[in-house]
Image (spheres, rainbow, N blue to C red):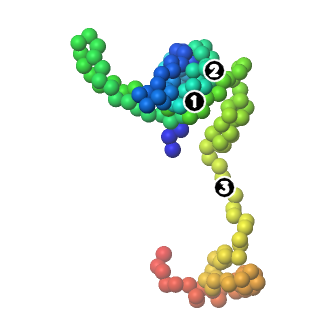
Amino acid sequence: MNSCTLIAEIVESPQLRRTPDDTPVANMLVRFDGLRDNDPPAMLRVTGWRNLAEEISANYRAGDRVIIIGSLKMDRLDVEKQGVRYKETRAELNLSRIYKQTGEFSETQVESVVPSVAATPVAVASPAPTSNLGNVVPIGNYNRATSSSDFESETSSAESTDMEDEADLDDIPF
């Protein structure tokens, strides 16, 4: 899934224009901090379409701090500088949501906007399943239980006769 969430400052006020079929499009330039302390800030072109474009144009200006969410795309352009032609790759964010950031940045502010991204740890240990245990067959007992009472009787018989079940095992050389 291509989803990008950034906390940024609008550097260039949104410019609203319309496509030939009268679809509103707003473009703006944002700046966000680098990943490390010594990294310079990065600039990114952001594009919003339709109703979002009109909202951006009406409510956001240069200098506003925003939380932006969208999909990142890369454009390859032919550029000519000082008589030399070369290909340049530029990143652009297609905006799906935007929120004004008020006051200082806080983690709870991002969590309230993007709870699935900010509040979810990267690695989560999943708990053992606890429902529908009637279809679980204990190790060492290969007779499939047909009901919960059969399951309980098979579990107790499997615990009492450990050596008897070894004869039922397949001859697989491991």
- Determine the secondary structure under disc 3: loop
Please name the residue shown 41% across and 32% down the image. Answer: 74
For the residues labelled 1 and 2, the Cα–Cα distance comes to: 10 Å
The spot of residue 29 in percent (x, y) is 50, 19
Tell me the amino acid under the disc marked 3: Ser
In the figure, is residue 158 to the left or right of 71?
A: right
- Residue receiving disc 2: 59
Residue 96 sits in quarter: top right
Neighbourhood count class around disc 2 (C-alpha, 10 Å): few under 14, some 14–19, many 20 upward:
few
At x 48% / y 22%, what residue is drawn? 17
- Contact (Cβ within 8 Å) of mark 1 with mark 3: no
Between 145 and 49, the residue placed more toward the observer is 49
Res. 92 visible in picture: no
The answer to which of marks 1 and 3 sits earlier in the sequence is: 1
Which comes before the other along the chain, label 1 or label 2? 1
Proximity of marks 3 and 2: CB atoms separated by less than 8 Å: no
Label 3 – label 2 distance at C-alpha: 42 Å
- Tell me which amino acid carries mark 1: Leu
The residue at which mark 3 appears reads as 126
Inspect the image, locate mark 2, and give the three-letter code of the amino acid beneath it. Answer: Asn
Q: How many marks?
A: 3
**Residue 134 screen position, x and y as percent:** 71, 76
Residue 63 locus on image (x, y percent): 60, 14
Of 21 and 1, the residue lying toward us: 21
